[in-house]
Image (tube, grey):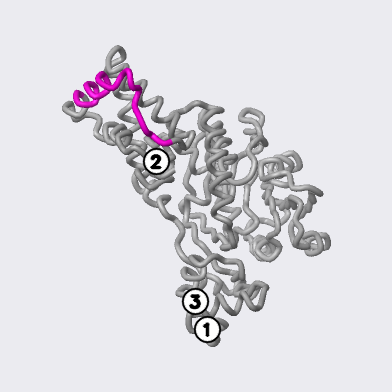
Amino acid sequence: MIDVSIIIPTYNKKRHLRLSLYALEKQTFDHSRFEVIVIDDGSTDGTWRRLRKYKPPYPFRYIRNIKNTGRAASRNKGIQLARGRVLIFLDAEILVEEDFIQKHWSYHEKEDMAVVSGVFGRFHGLYSILHPSFNRWQFKHCYPIVRKMPLIRKRFRSSVGLSRYLKRRKKPLQLVGRRSIDNHRYTRAAFSKSYYLEHLVSRYGPELRGFHFPWISFLSGNVSVKKESFDTVGLFDESFKGYGFEDWELGYRYFLNGYKFIAGENIVSYHQEHPVNPNTRSREHKTNHLRFFEKHRDYGIAMLVLYEIGLKNYVEINQALDEYYRLRDDFPDKYMTYKASFHRFCERLAQRKAIDDHFSEYDVAFESDHSDLKRLGRYPQLVSVMELQDRKRLPM
């Protein structure tokens, strides 16, 4: 009987995927009780040659899309094929420890309506493979981490020397192999990647209580839910193309349906770093964020732009939204101009448009409301957010 299905979409990541699949061979969870489904979304790097004859000790299915259909469509195909009661979504470049499946499974044994985020646990970056197409920042960042490894220490004295070698070589340099996974030496090429995640868990607890955006923990690189939940919540929205937000949007629907979000603090995973095109990602990210906002019209979704552009952290945004809801409840028939201005501000954030003016016909009323609320001192973060309107152009 299959209890757990691991769904892995992949696109041109054959080297990383090979390591990720090998790590799953080391699982302590009974191999007959879980399956791995890889959906190859039109890879052109020869992924199919590596996987068509792959025979791991667990049930394995390899599905190849002739054309690239996108992350959402690939994951939906995996959901439809899955036989497990619990589905774990895993990215092709995520390498996990031996107790990974067992820990995800344990959470779902205790909770009927759980969304378990592995990325909100102990999440690390890993330079398992060095690529010639790494950008300058990646080379600068990786060198102090990997220089202690014998292959690097003996040959390269600086990140410049390493990058020049790889560019001349024109193919990746693999630092982590099966033996490194067997003896856990791959951790020498790892670094903490928890960012804001640990801070949120320490403030709001592993269930993110009091946090208006628990759905940001639905990161499809490492998250699990019960299969039956899709009957209520629905599948990934395939209208999201390119990078970003198809997972948060689904997480938001879980939130609307009353599911409990749990940060799997004891789940350890490693993201194998790979080349990225920040310009392409940025364009896709903005387009998909606007699609997300327009689908649900939740001003909290728009306010997350303030984190992305570095003006507010998640705690401050959460507090500002708390204060807006409190203002709305405290004064249902007052400060109407201020509330309308807040709505417009959020609309323009979602659209990534400059905050270049107020409602011109309401300027006097807005300033009066703003001064009044500032004197009250009960809504400091909301006041601070609304003062951003006076910055004629935000860094969108």
User: Few, some or many C-alpha atoms within 10 Å of disc 1 (few <14, some 14-19, many ≥20)?
Assistant: some
Please say if the residues under marks 2 and 3 sit with CB atoms less than 8 Å apart.
Answer: no
Q: Which mark is residue 159?
A: 3
Residue 156, numbered label: 1
Determine crowd level at label 2: few under 14, some 14-19, many 20+ residues with C-alpha closer than 10 A. many
Location of residue 172 with respect to 11 vertically, above or below: below
Three-letter code for the amino acid on which mark 3 is drawn:
Ser
- Relative to 374, 208 lies left or right: right
From the image, tell me which residue sits under label 2.
306
The residues bearing labels 2 and 1 have C-alpha atoms spaced at a distance of: 41 Å
Q: Residue at x 66, y 29 (%)?
A: 231
Q: Secondary structure at mark 1?
A: loop
Q: Are the residues at dot 1 and dot 3 in contact (C-beta closer than 8 Å)?
A: yes
Q: Position of residue 219 (x, y in %)?
A: 55, 46
**Label 2 to label 3: alpha-carbon separation:** 34 Å
Secondary structure found at label 3: helix
| Location of residue 380 with respect to 53 vertically, above or below | above
Q: Residue furthest top?
A: 333
Mark 1 → mark 3, Cα distance in angstroms: 8 Å
Q: Which residues are magenta?
A: 354-372
Name the amino acid, label 1.
Answer: Phe
The answer to which of 333 and 29 lies nearer the viewer is 333
Judge whether residue 257 can be spotted in this image: no
Q: Amino acid at mark 2?
A: Leu
Image point (53%, 27%), residue name:
296
Instruction: Indicate which disc residue 282 carries.
Output: none
Which element carries disc 2, helix, strand or loop? helix
